[in-house]
Image (cartoon, rainbow, N blue to C red):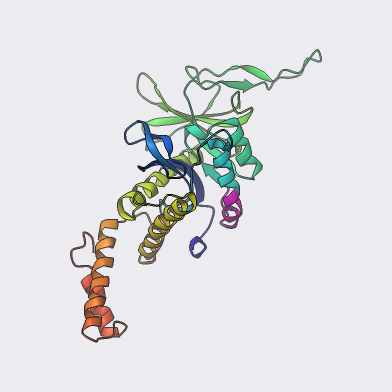
Amino acid sequence: MLRTQEMDEHWIASIDASFIPKSGKITEGIGYFYSGCTSKVQRGLEMSLVSVVDLKANTGFSLLAKQTRVEQDQTSPEKNKIDQALDQIRECSADLRQLKIHDLVANAWYSKEKFVNGVVEEGFNMIGKLRQDAHLKFLFTGKYTGKGRPKKYDGRVKFTDLRRFTKTEMPKEDFDLYSKVVWSHSMKREILVVVLRNRGEKKKILALLYTTNLSTSPVDVLQKYRARFQIEFVIRDAKQHTGLNHSQARTLVAIENHFNQSLIALNLLKIEDQQQAPKRIQKVISFASWRRRKFNQHLAKIVFCMFGSEANKKKIKQVIENIGCYGAISA
């Protein structure tokens, strides 16, 4: 379905997890997961979603949703969440390559050695976020003295002193970017770290971003990480408009089918909305209006059929199209 879109270098992939409320005792995979809405751990299900994001149109499309599996008993141990997330990326890797996607963007929870190295092994660049107390070291670039083991590092990175970083001014923002290739102690690899520092008197560090692509620009890292939040909107819209939370299934296969069908319905609606635009532009999609249009058109077709009229006639099609906009928020 997504192959019908114009695929180019302005697309990225993203992964995130979301809490799904679920009651009962015998639902497969039910357990305790963190809910961002309530900021606490709750009993229910968790969905892991891989999506693709169009940077030009600034909108996201779901690719594959999986249910997070939990260990039910000691006789059938499950993989941990990092292993499951990596398996999901591997399952999607062929589709991502076919869509010409090279970058995977994720939040700070995924900034772990096993996940980052696994993503790189699959041939993708990882873009993510670090804690502000991350253990980073400068790489030693001096000459070898000829005695002993060659020096690899040149001290720990302290973000109170950014003189060794390359500054990139952001005229339209209230912060500037500082970038440097450093060694990550937690991920055991070289990364390009991008520091967002406020221009105010206190010069507060706003965020630490990073990428495994050492040759990319800091501005691209910032743009792609900002686009990551489109996956949050995909999950939100599916919960509000296409019934993502409304499954009564109990088996893992049925639950995952419901997740993906709900998200596919959202994809189809977005594609139809984009097809009505003259070109790929950033625009706000009103799903409430689309639901109203679809309901009105469906009701109009039923009425015409009851009167013995064929809904595929040209004049009736035009009437149904006009009736569809009745009560919609946007035209």
Q: Which residue ends up furthest to the right in the rendered image?
A: 146
- Is residue 217 in sight in this rendering? no
Q: Residue at x 53, y 38 (%)?
A: 127
Nearest the eye: 17 or 153: 17
> Residue 164: within the magenta?
no
Q: Quadrant of residue 41?
A: top left
Residue occupying image coordinates x 72% and y 17% = 151
Whether residue 313 is situated above or below residue 229 in the rendered picture: below
Residue 126 point in image, percent of width and height:
56, 39
- Looking at the image, which residue sits at the far left? 327
Q: Is residue 98 magenta?
A: yes
The residue under the point 26% across, 79% down is: 318
Q: In which quadrant is the C terminus drawn?
A: bottom left
Side of 265 relative to 303 (left or right): right
Dividing the picture into quadrants, the one containing residue 113 is top right
- Residue 254 at least partly seen: yes
Highlighted range, magenta: 91-102
Position of residue 185 measured from the top left corner of the image (x, y, whole percent): 60, 23
Residue 109, image x, y percentages: 49, 32
Q: Locate residue 253, reporting x and y percent.
A: 49, 53
Left or right: where 87 falls relative to 21: right
